[in-house]
Image (cartoon, rainbow, N blue to C red):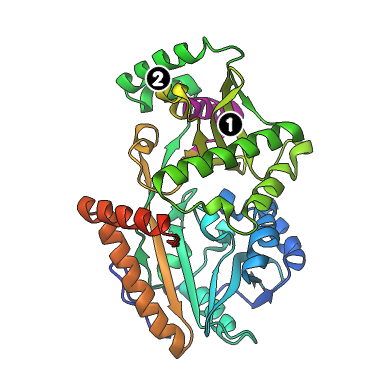
Amino acid sequence: MANALDDDSSQLRVDSRPRRLADVCILDDLSEAEPYWRMLQAQDAVATPYQGFEFLAAWQREVGSRCGVTPFVVIGLDSHERPLYLLPFGLYRAGPLRQLCFLGGKHANYNFGIWDRAAAASAADLQFILQRIAASPHRPDLLTLYSQPRAWRGLDNPFLLLPHRQGPSNGASLVIDGPGAEVIEREVGAATRGRLRTKERKLQKLTGYRYFRATLPAEVDRLLQRFFDLKASHMAAQGLANVFAEKGVAAFLRSACHRGLGDGRPSIELHALEGDGEILALFGVLTDGQSLSVMINTYTLSENARHSPGLILILHLIQLCADRGITGFDLGAGDAPYKSWFCKQPIMLFDSFLPLTPLGRLSAIGMDTASALKREIKNTSALWSAYRSLSRAFNRSGGDVQRQ
């Protein structure tokens, strides 16, 4: 198997640990994979909130299936047929190229697989998995694995043992290890805290001002409709393509927000500030009880936007995490300046382009080069500004710029 060019690791890491896996099972039906998924989750396997079964099942049902994605769930088993690792992939055909990607697409900020911490996946395990993938009847050409954290909850990502490249963007997190007020005082600058307290006092003058979490179906529907309306307006004003208008996306978000709501555990929780009858800011978050990650967000277009309701809502979410015993908080992938005001611990991301056939090898070289170029553009302010201007012009003319 040829190695893609890589500015982090173009070669296999030296790793002499023996193989733990006895077999690899590949399933194209999520319902068949669900028992293995549940078993790993029950034994506290490591994954990000974006690898929750309900979340990815909703995405596959409403988005993936409409875009030609077929589940390709890879499960590593020990000699007792117990799952040690689960990789929630999907098979997608782009022309003649058969690609394996993480389920969730661009709606998953972080992709980590589901790993039994005690099993400690080795390079031999990963090579065994890749050999079984390459020998499957579907014959994938390439694994295209974006937005993988280098570590999560103290576990190094096993895919670091394989060729990889630093991603174009990173994330950042906040460790919540005490009462919310203490964490905010320690981690958020005094000037920022002072400005936001002043701004919230102004919002508190609005009739019916409150922070709340949607717990009823009618509240979910109301907030989602407002989210879609505001996002469409924001993106049109910026000349950007509205990714939330793509096939199946609205149905996916509705499904993920409603499913489990009655039990208090929806796949996506909606949190909002409102006052004077308008939604001032809205965040959709994923949580697994240990980490809380912001997936979607928007804010009002009225004059009340000058009081920074989105930033105020972040403070409420940090307090919520402290109250619920959630120790990790992040604002999603991307390098927006405001994120560093709250989250200062980096979440370093990398991409892997792992070819399995000659066609995959050619494609991996192109994708690897494109990834390196994108990172260079995003880290050079003049180039990034020019790129965004070009994207806006292209979208206003009816084109579409794809994002991964």
Asked whether 224 or 230 is in front, the reply is 230
| Residue type at numbered disc 2 | Leu
Give the residue number, with chain letter if any, for mark 1: 325
Distance between mark 1 and mark 2 Cα atoms:
24 Å
Relative image position of residue 270 (x, y in whole percent): 62, 36
**What residue is drawn where x is 68% and y is 31%?**
214
- Magenta-drawn segment: 312-328
Q: Is residue 18 visible?
A: no
In the picture, which quadrant includes the C terminus?
Answer: bottom left
**What residue is drawn where x is 52% and y is 85%?**
96
Relative image position of residue 380 (x, y in whole percent): 22, 54
Q: Mark 2 Cα within 10 Å, few/some/many (few <14, many 20+)?
A: some
Query: Is residue 314 rendered magenta in the image?
Result: yes
333 is higher (above) or lower (below) than 272: below
Q: Is residue 24 visible?
A: yes
**What residue is drawn where x is 48% and y is 88%?**
357
User: Which sits earlier in the primary sequence, circle 1 or circle 2?
Assistant: 2
**Magenta highlight: main SS:** helix
Q: Residue furthest front?
A: 397
382 is higher (above) or lower (below) than 27: above
Relative image position of residue 235 (x, y in whole percent): 46, 45
Q: Mark 1 Cα within 10 Å, few/some/many (few <14, many 20+)?
A: some
Query: Is residue 311 rendered magenta in the image?
Result: no
Give the residue number, with chain letter if any, for mark 2: 196
Q: Residue furthest top?
A: 205
**What residue is drawn where x is 30% and y is 60%?**
375
Judging from the image, what secondary structure is the residue with disc 1 in? loop
Lateral position of residue 83 relative to residue 396, left or right: right
| Residue type at numbered disc 1 | Gly
Judging from the image, what secondary structure is the residue with disc 2 in? helix
